Image (cartoon, rainbow, N blue to C red):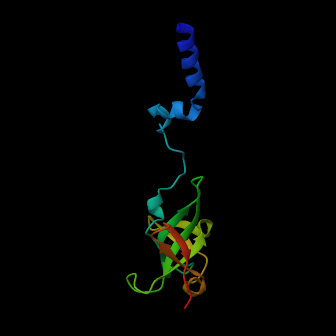
Amino acid sequence: MKRLASALVLTLLLAIPFGVASAANPSEQTMNSLPSGVLPISDYYNQSVYDAKDNKIGDINDLIVEKDGKISAAIIGVGGFLGAGEKNVAIPFTALKLTEKNGKRYLVMDTTKEALNKAPGYTFDRTAKQWVPAKQG
Protein backbone atom coordinates (compact mmCIF):
# COMPACT_ATOMS: atom_id res chain seq x y z
CA MET A 1 0.00 0.00 0.00
CA LYS A 2 2.87 2.33 0.87
CA ARG A 3 4.44 1.70 -2.56
CA LEU A 4 1.13 2.43 -4.30
CA ALA A 5 0.78 5.74 -2.43
CA SER A 6 4.37 6.70 -3.30
CA ALA A 7 3.82 5.84 -6.95
CA LEU A 8 0.61 7.89 -7.00
CA VAL A 9 2.36 10.92 -5.48
CA LEU A 10 5.23 10.61 -7.96
CA THR A 11 2.77 10.33 -10.87
CA LEU A 12 0.90 13.44 -9.71
CA LEU A 13 4.13 15.43 -9.33
CA LEU A 14 5.26 14.47 -12.81
CA ALA A 15 1.86 15.38 -14.25
CA ILE A 16 2.00 18.98 -12.94
CA PRO A 17 3.34 21.30 -15.66
CA PHE A 18 6.53 23.02 -14.63
CA GLY A 19 4.98 26.47 -15.19
CA VAL A 20 2.22 25.78 -12.67
CA ALA A 21 4.65 24.67 -9.98
CA SER A 22 6.90 27.70 -10.49
CA ALA A 23 3.99 30.18 -10.63
CA ALA A 24 3.44 29.62 -6.93
CA ASN A 25 6.90 31.04 -6.20
CA PRO A 26 6.44 34.82 -5.76
CA SER A 27 10.10 35.57 -6.51
CA GLU A 28 9.53 34.35 -10.08
CA GLN A 29 6.53 36.68 -10.50
CA THR A 30 8.29 39.92 -9.55
CA MET A 31 11.39 41.77 -10.73
CA ASN A 32 14.29 42.84 -8.55
CA SER A 33 15.30 45.51 -11.06
CA LEU A 34 13.98 47.08 -14.24
CA PRO A 35 15.73 46.95 -17.62
CA SER A 36 17.74 50.06 -18.42
CA GLY A 37 16.54 52.54 -21.01
CA VAL A 38 12.85 51.68 -20.71
CA LEU A 39 10.09 54.30 -20.79
CA PRO A 40 6.88 54.46 -18.78
CA ILE A 41 3.61 54.05 -20.65
CA SER A 42 2.58 57.46 -19.28
CA ASP A 43 5.03 59.04 -21.75
CA TYR A 44 2.64 57.86 -24.48
CA TYR A 45 -0.90 57.19 -23.26
CA ASN A 46 -3.23 60.22 -23.28
CA GLN A 47 -0.43 62.44 -24.58
CA SER A 48 -0.60 64.97 -27.40
CA VAL A 49 1.15 64.24 -30.69
CA TYR A 50 2.87 66.96 -32.71
CA ASP A 51 4.14 67.20 -36.28
CA ALA A 52 7.73 68.13 -37.16
CA LYS A 53 6.78 71.85 -37.02
CA ASP A 54 5.44 71.59 -33.42
CA ASN A 55 1.78 71.74 -34.49
CA LYS A 56 -0.52 69.54 -32.44
CA ILE A 57 -2.01 66.87 -34.70
CA GLY A 58 -3.82 64.62 -32.24
CA ASP A 59 -3.88 62.73 -28.95
CA ILE A 60 -3.03 59.14 -28.08
CA ASN A 61 -6.35 57.51 -27.12
CA ASP A 62 -5.13 53.91 -26.86
CA LEU A 63 -2.16 51.62 -27.35
CA ILE A 64 -2.59 48.24 -29.03
CA VAL A 65 -0.67 45.45 -27.29
CA GLU A 66 -0.06 42.12 -29.03
CA LYS A 67 -0.37 38.83 -27.16
CA ASP A 68 3.40 38.71 -26.64
CA GLY A 69 3.29 42.13 -24.91
CA LYS A 70 4.71 44.19 -27.79
CA ILE A 71 2.99 47.51 -28.47
CA SER A 72 2.28 47.42 -32.20
CA ALA A 73 -0.03 50.37 -32.81
CA ALA A 74 -1.39 53.55 -31.32
CA ILE A 75 -4.88 54.95 -31.76
CA ILE A 76 -4.72 58.70 -32.29
CA GLY A 77 -7.74 60.96 -31.99
CA VAL A 78 -7.65 63.73 -34.61
CA GLY A 79 -9.94 66.63 -35.34
CA GLY A 80 -12.98 67.57 -33.34
CA PHE A 81 -13.16 69.71 -30.24
CA LEU A 82 -12.85 68.28 -26.72
CA GLY A 83 -13.49 64.79 -28.12
CA ALA A 84 -16.66 65.74 -30.04
CA GLY A 85 -16.34 65.01 -33.76
CA GLU A 86 -12.99 63.34 -33.20
CA LYS A 87 -11.83 60.60 -35.56
CA ASN A 88 -9.65 57.74 -34.29
CA VAL A 89 -6.94 56.45 -36.61
CA ALA A 90 -4.39 53.68 -36.15
CA ILE A 91 -0.70 54.27 -36.67
CA PRO A 92 2.29 51.97 -36.22
CA PHE A 93 3.72 52.51 -32.74
CA THR A 94 7.17 52.87 -34.31
CA ALA A 95 5.97 56.02 -36.13
CA LEU A 96 5.95 57.87 -32.79
CA LYS A 97 9.18 59.50 -31.67
CA LEU A 98 9.60 60.60 -28.07
CA THR A 99 11.42 63.93 -28.05
CA GLU A 100 12.58 66.16 -25.25
CA LYS A 101 12.33 69.92 -25.39
CA ASN A 102 12.91 72.35 -22.52
CA GLY A 103 13.10 69.42 -20.10
CA LYS A 104 9.70 68.04 -21.11
CA ARG A 105 9.02 64.89 -23.13
CA TYR A 106 6.55 65.00 -26.00
CA LEU A 107 5.57 62.87 -28.99
CA VAL A 108 6.38 63.77 -32.59
CA MET A 109 5.24 62.08 -35.76
CA ASP A 110 6.40 62.68 -39.32
CA THR A 111 2.95 63.41 -40.79
CA THR A 112 0.31 66.11 -40.89
CA LYS A 113 -3.10 66.52 -39.34
CA GLU A 114 -4.59 66.47 -42.85
CA ALA A 115 -2.97 63.09 -43.62
CA LEU A 116 -4.32 61.63 -40.38
CA ASN A 117 -7.81 62.98 -41.15
CA LYS A 118 -7.70 61.13 -44.51
CA ALA A 119 -6.67 57.82 -42.90
CA PRO A 120 -9.25 55.09 -42.23
CA GLY A 121 -11.12 55.58 -38.98
CA TYR A 122 -11.69 53.14 -36.12
CA THR A 123 -14.28 52.85 -33.37
CA PHE A 124 -14.07 50.87 -30.16
CA ASP A 125 -16.50 47.94 -29.98
CA ARG A 126 -17.25 47.69 -26.26
CA THR A 127 -18.85 44.24 -26.64
CA ALA A 128 -15.85 42.72 -28.42
CA LYS A 129 -13.41 44.97 -26.48
CA GLN A 130 -11.45 45.81 -29.59
CA TRP A 131 -10.97 48.53 -32.19
CA VAL A 132 -12.83 47.91 -35.46
CA PRO A 133 -12.98 49.83 -38.73
CA ALA A 134 -15.47 52.69 -38.56
CA LYS A 135 -18.56 52.39 -40.72
CA GLN A 136 -18.47 54.69 -43.74
CA GLY A 137 -21.33 57.01 -44.40
Quarter of the image with the C terminus in it: bottom right
Vertical relation: 8 (above or below) 50: above
Residue in view at x 56 percent, y 35 percent: 19
Instruction: Give the x, y percent position of residue 46.
Output: 43, 69
> Do we see residue 15 in this rendering?
yes
Q: In this view, does 8 lie to the left or right of 83?
A: right
Residue in view at x 56 percent, y 18 percent: 8
Q: Residue pushed farthest left?
A: 82
Q: Residue pushed farthest top?
A: 2
Q: How many labels does the image show?
A: 0
Q: Residue pushed farthest front?
A: 1
Q: In this view, does 46 lie to the left or right of 96?
A: left
Instruction: Give the x, y percent position of residue 94.
Output: 62, 65
Instruction: Give the x, y percent position of residue 121.
Output: 55, 81
From the viewer's side, name the closer residue of 120 and 32. 120
From the viewer's side, name the closer residue of 20 and 54. 20
> Do we see residue 100 in this rendering?
no
Residue in view at x 60 percent, y 80 percent: 111
Vertical relation: 94 (above or below) 68: below
From the viewer's side, name the closer residue of 4 and 114. 4
Residue in view at x 60 percent, y 24 percent: 14
Vertical relation: 125 (above or below) 6: below
The quarter of the displayed image where residue 85 is located: bottom left
Instruction: Give the x, y percent position of residue 35.
Output: 54, 45
Vertical relation: 121 (above or below) 17: below
